[in-house]
Amino acid sequence: MNDSEFFIDYNNVNISYNDIDILRNVDFKLAKGEIVYLIGRVGCGKSTLLKSFYAEAQITDGNARVLDYDLKVIKEKQIPYLRRKLGIVFQDFKLLTDRSVNANLEFVLRATDMTDKSAIEHRIQEVLDFVGMSNKGYKMPHELSGGEQQRVVMARAMLNSPQLLLADEPTGNLDSHTGLEIMQLIQKVLQSGTSVVMATHNMRWITMFPGRVIHCVDGKLSEIPSSQLQNLTLDDFYKLYDY
């Protein structure tokens, strides 16, 4: 595969956040339609890596490209255009609590300069249908279960048909059944051609929905060969990878 075919291409990258060095010597590539899981203890740098992809964490050294944007020299005015090509799913939802589901989604579309009312309504209905929430647009966030709120977050992330979905512990606050439903939605996203990078502590998802696995420890990343993951028990996994 040529370098230009990678959605993310990091070579020997150092990353800082709030002027604190977090990750160093990062080599990371992501191709179209791939899912990559980031694993590691809380505070190891998984979230910082995700933040670097949308230019919230700083690239201080190395070569870093995301969707043809050079993050080492990206201009402030270019960052919103990069972010429009990304979908971001947070563990704690980050929905606007003072407005309905439809109004939350409309807010995002208008922020990306969509003004046609019928086009906005059509796109909102499309993404709500995609996540199985077609009849919940009038609801306020507090009227929804945690799983329903995360579905709305998934819908919000898909509004601009992103090439890349970044998910930071998207099932962390959900029970196992609801978490499985969210993972099945992420599989639908993959099938649409969108690539996914997902931080998780849940080995179950890695077993059920295989992908590349990157271990983050001591400020560095290392890819775990799939052969090492086969036939591991959950306890063995946690012991081996320092959870």
Image (spheres, helix red, strand yellow):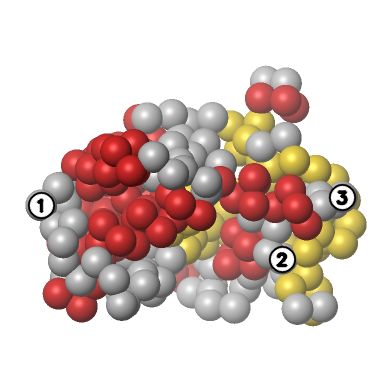
Q: Which quarter of the figure has residue 96?
A: bottom left
Q: Are marks 3 and 1 in contact (CB under 8 Å)?
A: no
Q: Residue furthest top?
A: 1
Q: Amino acid at mark 2?
A: Ala
What residue would you read off at disc 1? 135
Secondary structure beneath disc 3?
Answer: loop
Report whether residue 33 is seen: yes
State the image coordinates of residue 85 (x, y, percent, origin top left): 56, 42
What residue did someone put label 2 on? 57
Estimate the spatial distance between the alpha carbons at disc 3 and disc 2, rounded to whole Å: 13 Å
Q: In the image as oriented, which residue stretches furthest toward the left?
A: 135
Query: What residue sits 36% from the left and 54% below the top?
Result: 106
Marks 3 and 1, the one that precedes in the sequence: 3
Q: Report the residue at 47% width, 63% height from top.
A: 168
Q: Amino acid at mark 1?
A: Asn
Closer to us: mark 3 or mark 2? 3
Element on which disc 1 rests: loop
Q: Nearer the viewer, mark 1 or mark 2?
A: 1
User: Is disc 3 surrounded by few (<14), some (14 to 19) or many (20+) residues within 10 Å?
Assistant: few
- Mark 2 and mark 3 in contact (Cβ < 8 Å)? no
Point out residue 36 in the picture as x, y percentages from the top left corner: 51, 46
Residue depicted at 70% across the width and 52% down the height: 79
Is residue 236 visible in the rendered image? The answer is no
Q: Is residue 28 above or below residue 221?
A: above
- Pointer 3: what residue? 73
Give whichever of 227, 131 is nearer the camera.
Answer: 131
Residue at the (54%, 30%) spot, across then down: 32
User: Nearer the observer, disc 3 or disc 1?
Assistant: 1
User: In this orientation, which residue lies closer to the viewer: 127 or 227?
Assistant: 127
